[in-house]
Image (cartoon, coloured by chain):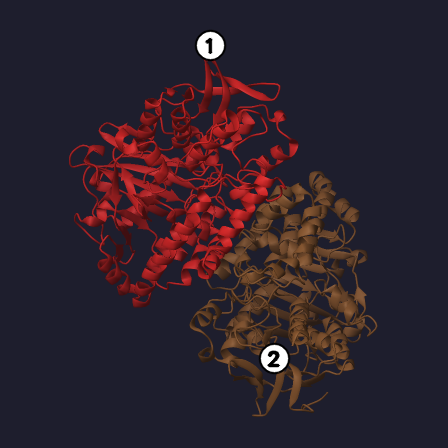
């Protein structure tokens, strides 16, 4: 790994080597540009990277699932040639009812319907049609992933061309499905699922996905959109985009890194940027922690818009209305991450032969009221005393991630507000709540634990430079999407300063392990360069 | 051979009467049929206790469209609007926030809590004023169908797009935010002090089953800003003689144009032949025939009760099944022996002649919402109070007063018991809450009328007691209101129209739907283009 750049001048400098920064760098390098990536931390990947937290274990720090990753990036960069291997587990999501009975959404729609039939014949009958609606509607959103939003209201005719494909796609849905989509987008996920189903556990399995990373409960309007967002690349019959990477999300990071390097990009870890250099209202490069200055024709930041514009650019270099907008971006950390090293496979309330059920996401959330109450706590500034947990056991698909038959358990703990005094006492209290909640499902859990890593939203903020610990670099509410993301007036990855681009989750289309903001931003830069 | 009318209007609420007045004014032979013994629907004045007149349901006026007042010459028919000039927010600690007609006094009052808010309040007021002005146009048009390729719809969409894109940048983004944000988030862009945030955000939740932190509530904020009286936006008032005064003025105008109005005439069914409406039959068995029948009732009654739903396409029946009513408010009307004494401001003063809002903070209202989410009425509800007898002494015997309390939240569906069992407990919760701010309340209380959502449904016919004939949520607005394909007042039954609040532009005492429906009927069925 390089520790100092070979040169002073580049075509493009990318700040931050998270998955979006690396995706942008790889796309730019592939087009023949001289690209430098600067990462403050000692390892690459940001919240999608892994570290040897526990002895001989590569532990993913934030990401779990790579189901949202942009297919265009995989093909254009040939990531599969570079060793990327997908793992499609038979189970998508398993929940446990309040009586402790498991309900699994399988990748196979008929198997799921059979499973649901044990709870409700009516729901089982409706599930395939529901899956159809999810498939059709989320396909329209998938088209929007790579669209550069127009800068409304200063719309130019050329801006409309990019909308042609999604618009045609939407039209192909037919009038009925199109109107249904318009109707669903602003709904709450609870209302949406109530229209379809009666089984509480089924609604929880489907609906819990849409509040991850959000400071909103399932009754909040706009959460139905997130249900669709989390299904953008789902195959027909699947209701969640879920696939894992052999070797964990870090293997995806390695493939991206390798692709960028093969195309000539330089990637330096352990070199933090402290300032974006500005001359005549244009970004001309960066200044490093060690005082060194590097120059580029284009500067891309994968940090969130507030870090980028306030910390690196400086509010004094911005117009007042921009400062106000950036200050008002809704950033709300709501997630903590608990990683456990376990001596053996945790014994949930299932038959040993049924361990396939654990292969996807295991969700602790028996019904949507449980989820809403978990949010109620956070709404008033406490962490949930009965939290919603989204658990992945990565060692089930890839035993090599932990030694000697040990297992890893990655747990996203929702809703834990950032604005708590996250001292040792508070951390211990959170840990207790999570372990107690888990122990009701896995009674022997505490005895199985070999090692623990807890990342509070404050830790996420510090470790990964995520303002307010918001993993999406800005909440994914309807008010912060498309041309409203990251702030109104700057949706096209270009920032208020010339030659400065935003390429992280704070830009369209938003958060998750998608790579789409990086991909889109890189193409904007290339468009600019080819015009020059 | 019974008389044949040109148009029969079902329901003598303000929209039904408005439609009838416009139709009669165009020279059509028009009949209004009202089920109750009084006109007005939810805009009625009734002497519930001897000498005490209550605006039983709707209690203030602001949204009534000025063009209706002009076209129907309502002042000539007895409409007098008395201005409501102030808002008092008493606080639990004995302090209060007062905003009155005197601008500087309001400024000083707000500044006591936050000087920053006092400055922002002016900007905010100006911004909302211009927003309301800009959006007003949209309330006056018939919504185009986005999924249709009909030239009229395409043209309508184009016009609409031009309107939107023609907005000033700042207004455009503000409109986007108003449509998608929560009222608390939206207001926090301007304000920081709790009493002001609480009171302003309360108008975002009125009539909806949302809390101030639920996305989508900001739209209702704007909806309440659309009101204008004598060209002054955002002004509220009482109708002299109570809200029933509005209905009787419109009824008087309708009669002056030749419309016939019958009370105690409950329509049991709309008669159809070969898929066309031909008249109505009353519960008494009496029949009336007409070329056109228009219903001002809500969709549940208009489509499910008055006609045979099998006349409707299946997808419309399905869409109407999904239409959300969800009444969330109740009304408590009090007859008082003397003027109430507020702990924060004893004695009589201008504060008693304005609105009084029990909304000390956002969390207070949010807590009230939390209870309702799980099927209980709020033990400490948000209450909007007016004392009409302070301004209009005819409403109560000399020296005595009537106090009208709009109460939220009261969910139509209770988790335990039913409203007939819980009515008095609900009334007690309101009185107890009020007593915290008005210590002498229990001593001066003569009578109380407690109206739960179930009572509202029983008396007015509003399904689930929803005051807007269905929630004003983004998925139920504009071309989606009440269902795709039903947004233009027409129904799939030829000659059968709808003109209630469930049609565009939605609820509130505006009369806009009645007017727009009448204009549409004149154009479609009688080939007339009304100049107004």
Q: Secondary structure at mark 1?
A: loop
> Which residue is at 25% across, 39% downward?
B388
Does residue B248 appear to the left or right of A336 in the view shown? left
The quadrant where residue B115 appears: bottom left
Q: Position of residue B46 (x, y in %)?
A: 30, 29
Q: Is residue B278 above or below residue B439?
A: above
> Which residue is at 68% across, 47% downward?
A171
Quarter in which the C terminus of chain B is drawn: top left
Q: Which mark is residue A299?
A: 2
> Which residue is at 34% across, 40% downward?
B66
Does residue B273 appear to the left or right of B179 in the view shown? right
Does residue B254 appear to the left or right of A307 in the view shown? left
Q: Position of residue A91 (x, y in %)?
A: 76, 56
Chain A, colour shown: brown
Q: Which residue is mark 1?
A: B2
Q: Which mark is residue B124?
A: none
Chain B, colour shown: red
Label 1 neighbour load within 10 Å: few <14, some 14-19, many 20+: few
């Amino acid at each position: 790994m390089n520790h100092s750049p070979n040169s002073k001048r580049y075509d493009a400098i990318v700040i931050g080597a998270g998955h979006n920064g690396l995706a942008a760098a790889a796309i730019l390098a592939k087009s023949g540009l001289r690209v430098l990536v600067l990462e403050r931390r000692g390892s690459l990947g940001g919240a999608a990277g892994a570290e040897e937290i526990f002895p001989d274990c590569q532990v993913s720090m934030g990401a779990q699932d790579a189901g949202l990753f942009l297919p265009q990036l995989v093909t254009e960069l040939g990531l599969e040639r570079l060793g990327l291997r997908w793992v499609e587990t038979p189970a998508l999501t398993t929940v446990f009812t309040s009586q402790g009975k498991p309900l699994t959404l399988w990748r196979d729609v008929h198997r799921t319907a059979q499973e649901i039939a044990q709870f409700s014949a009516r729901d089982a009958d409706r599930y395939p049609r529901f899956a159809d609606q999810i498939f059709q509607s989320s396909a329209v959103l998938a088209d929007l992933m790579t669209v550069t939003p127009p800068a409304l209201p200063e719309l130019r005719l050329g801006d409309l061309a990019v909308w042609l494909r999604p618009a045609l796609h939407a039209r192909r849905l037919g009038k009925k499905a199109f109107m249904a989509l318009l109707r669903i987008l602003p709904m709450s996920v609870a209302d949406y699922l109530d229209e379809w189903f009666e089984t509480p556990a089924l609604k929880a399995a489907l609906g819990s996905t849409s509040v991850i990373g959000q400071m909103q409960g399932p009754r909040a309007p706009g959460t139905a959109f997130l249900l669709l967002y989390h299904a953008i690349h789902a195959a027909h019959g699947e209701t969640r985009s879920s696939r894992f990477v052999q070797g964990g999300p870090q293997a995806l990071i390695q493939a991206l890194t390798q692709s960028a390097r093969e195309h000539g990009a330089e990637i330096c870890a352990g070199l933090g940027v402290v300032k974006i250099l500005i001359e005549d209202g244009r970004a001309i490069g960066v200044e490093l922690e060690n005082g060194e200055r590097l120059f580029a024709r284009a500067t891309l930041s994968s940090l969130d818009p507030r870090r980028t514009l306030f910390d690196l650019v400086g509010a004094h270099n911005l117009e007042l209305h921009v400062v106000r907008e950036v200050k008002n971006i809704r950033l709300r950390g709501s997630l903590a991450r608990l990683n456990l090293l376990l001596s053996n496979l945790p014994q949930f309330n299932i038959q040993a032969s049924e361990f396939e059920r654990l292969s996807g996401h295991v969700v602790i959330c028996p019904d949507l009221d449980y989820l809403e109450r978990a949010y109620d706590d956070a709404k008033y500034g406490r962490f949930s005393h009965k939290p919603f947990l989204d658990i992945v056991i990565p060692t089930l698909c890839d035993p090599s991630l932990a030694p000697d038959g040990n297992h890893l358990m990655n747990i996203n703990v929702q809703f834990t507000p950032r604005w708590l005094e996250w001292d040792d006492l508070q951390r211990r209290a959170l840990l207790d709540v999570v372990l107690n909640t888990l122990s009701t499902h896995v009674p022997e859990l505490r005895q199985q634990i070999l090692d623990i890593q807890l990342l509070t939203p404050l830790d996420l903020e510090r470790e990964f430079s995520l303002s307010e610990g918001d993993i999406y670099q800005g909440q994914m509410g309807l008010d912060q999407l498309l041309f409203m993301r990251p702030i109104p007036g700057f949706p096209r990855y270009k920032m208020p300063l010339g030659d400065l681009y935003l390429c992280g989750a704070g830009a369209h289309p938003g958060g998750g392990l998608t790579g789409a903001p990086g991909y889109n931003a890189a193409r904007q830069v290339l468009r600019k360069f080819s015009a020059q | 051979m019974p008389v044949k009318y040109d148009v029969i209007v079902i329901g003598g609420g303000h929209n039904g009467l408005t439609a009838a007045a416009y139709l009669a004014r165009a020279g059509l032979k028009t009949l209004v049929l009202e089920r109750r013994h009084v006109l007005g629907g939810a805009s009625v004045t009734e002497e519930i206790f001897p000498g005490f007149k209550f605006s039983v349901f709707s209690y203030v006026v602001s949204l009534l469209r000025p063009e209706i007042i002009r076209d129907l010459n309502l002042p000539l028919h007895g409409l007098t609007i008395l201005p409501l000039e102030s808002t008092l927010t008493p606080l639990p600690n004995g302090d209060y926030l007062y905003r009155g007609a005197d601008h500087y006094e309001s400024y000083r009052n707000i500044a006591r809590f936050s000087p920053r808010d006092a400055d922002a309040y002016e900007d905010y007021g100006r911004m909302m004023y211009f927003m309301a002005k800009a959006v007003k146009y949209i309330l006056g048009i018939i919504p185009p169908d986005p999924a249709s390729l009909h030239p009229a719809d395409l043209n309508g969409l184009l016009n609409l797009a031009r309107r939107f894109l023609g907005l000033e940048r700042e207004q455009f983004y503000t409109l986007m935010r108003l449509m998608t944000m929560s009222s608390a988030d939206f207001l926090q862009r301007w304000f920081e002090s709790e009493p002001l945030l609480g009171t302003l955000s309360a108008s975002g939740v009125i009539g909806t089953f949302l809390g101030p932190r639920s996305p989508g509530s900001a739209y209702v904020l704007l909806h309440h800003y659309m009101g204008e009286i004598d060209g002054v936006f955002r002004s509220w008032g009482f109708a002299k003689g109570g809200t029933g005064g509005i209905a009787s003025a419109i009824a008087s105008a309708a009669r002056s144009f030749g419309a016939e109005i019958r009370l105690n005439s409950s329509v049991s069914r709309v008669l159809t032949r070969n898929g066309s409406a031909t008249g109505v039959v009353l519960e008494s068995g009496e029949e009336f025939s007409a070329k056109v029948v228009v219903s001002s009732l809500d969709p549940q009654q208009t489509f499910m009760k008055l006609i045979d739903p099998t006349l409707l396409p299946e997808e419309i029946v399905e869409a109407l099944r999904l239409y959300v009513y969800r009444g969330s408010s109740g009304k408590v009307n009090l007859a008082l022996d003397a003027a109430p004494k507020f702990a924060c401001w004893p004695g009589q003063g201008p504060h008693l002649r304005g609105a009084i809002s029990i909304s000390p903070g956002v969390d207070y209202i949010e807590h009230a919402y939390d209870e309702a989410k799980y099927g209980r009425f709020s033990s400490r509800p948000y209450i909007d109070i007016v004392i009409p007898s302070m301004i209009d002494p005819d409403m109560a015997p000399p020296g005595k007063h009537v106090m009208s309390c709009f109460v939220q939240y009261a969910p139509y569906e209770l988790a335990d018991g039913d409203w007939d069992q819980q009515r008095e407990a609900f009334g007690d919760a309101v009185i107890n809450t009020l007593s915290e701010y008005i210590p002498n309340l229990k001593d001066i209380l003569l009578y109380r009328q407690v109206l739960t959502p179930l009572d509202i449904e029983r008396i007015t016919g509003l399904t689930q007691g929803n005051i807007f004939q269905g929630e004003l949520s983004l998925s139920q607005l504009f071309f989606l209101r009440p269902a795709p394909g039903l947004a233009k007042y027409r129904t799939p039954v030829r000659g059968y129209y709808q003109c209630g609040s469930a049609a565009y532009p939605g609820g509130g005492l505006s009369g806009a739907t009645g007017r727009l429906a009448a204009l549409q009927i004149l154009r479609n069925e009688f080939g007339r283009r009304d100049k107004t």
